[in-house]
Image: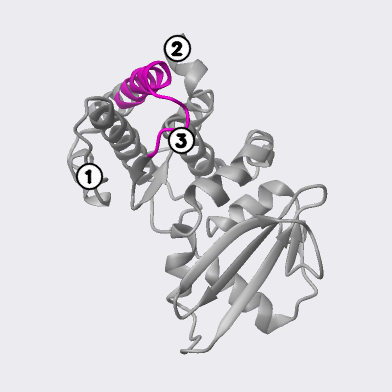
Amino acid sequence: MIPSRVEETLPELAPFVHAVQGRRPDDGTWCEAWTVRDVLVHQAGNAEELARVLQAFLEGTPVQTRGFDREQPYRQMPDCDLWTAFLNNCEKLTEVAAAGARHLPPDTEIMWTGRLVKPPFFAEHMREELILHRWDLAGDDQTAVQALNEPWMTEHSVVSVGRPLLERGRTGLDLGPDGRIEGRLRTPGMDDVVVTADADGGTIRLANPEGPATIESDAAVRVLLLWGRRPADPSRWYSAAGPEALRQVRTLLGGY
């Protein structure tokens, strides 16, 4: 059973847990390199690291964010121990996030993976991870689409995560020293997501809709595209940009 205070902070935890428990650990997922167990290992590491960085800041001894080698200890655990560690880490993150809300002004800047974030980021980012990786397990079911459609998911992906989402894809583009691409991802009734890439790096921002869009879709599909995912039904997105422009933007949106 998930404690009520954890469910209040991480309301997406229970649906994620149910999705994992409904599959075998070695089942495949929409994240092509990972099995169900790999997803759970990743989530255990996420919860631990988010709590560790925020806790260290609260104690006045800030630490750098570790890379994904933080997941290695979880890969060595038996399945039952991995489950316990994952749930304990989520509970710890809930406690630390509550302490952050009590003791830190909401605009306090904290370093996370090379960028500055605010205290609410830590629980919110875990929520996004739970939504996204539940989709990796369950695909486009009603629970996933409803969660991905939430406006905060788009804002968090663009504003709080942003440029790291583009780095993997940018390396796959042969732009040369003077090349540049720009793409607009449009969802009716919302700001456009504008992505660019050139020799110096990539940018991602929210902007008023103007001019032609590169890709149009519902909000849930747009979040999936930003994270390098694809909906099962490709008719949920459409484009009049032409094959080359579409290929470049899709390559840029390679995700992690």
Tell me if residue 206 comes above or below residue 20 in the rendering: below
Q: Earlier in the sequence, mark 2 or mark 3?
A: 2
**Marks 2 and 3, how far apart in space?**
18 Å
- Residue drawn at x 27%, y 27% is 55
Give the magenta range.
89-109
Give the amino acid type for the residue marked by disc 2 in the picture. Arg
Residue 105 or residue 251, whichever sits in front: 105
Residue 254 or residue 166, whichever sits in front: 166
Q: Earlier in the sequence, mark 1 or mark 3?
A: 1
The image shows residue 204 at horizontal and vertical percentages of: 57, 60
Quarter of the image for the N terminus: give it.
top left
* Residue 142 appears left or right of 23: right
Q: Which residue is mark 1?
A: 70
Tell me if residue 245 comes above or below residue 9 in the rendering: below
Q: Which residue is mark 2?
A: 5
Task: Describe the element under mark 1 as helix, strand or loop.
Answer: helix
Q: Is most of the magenta stretch helix, strand or loop?
A: helix
The image shows residue 88 at horizontal and vertical percentages of: 30, 22
Magenta span includes 103? yes
Q: Which residue is mark 3?
A: 121
The image shows residue 201 at horizontal and vertical percentages of: 46, 72
Give the amino acid type for the residue marked by disc 3 in the picture. Phe
Toward the top, the furthest residue is 4
- Residue drawn at x 31%, y 27% is 83
The image shows residue 245 at horizontal and vertical percentages of: 67, 79
**Marks 1 and 3, how far apart in space?**
20 Å
- Residue 36: mark in rendering: none
Q: Earlier in the sequence, mark 1 or mark 2?
A: 2
* Residue 226 appears left or right of 119: right
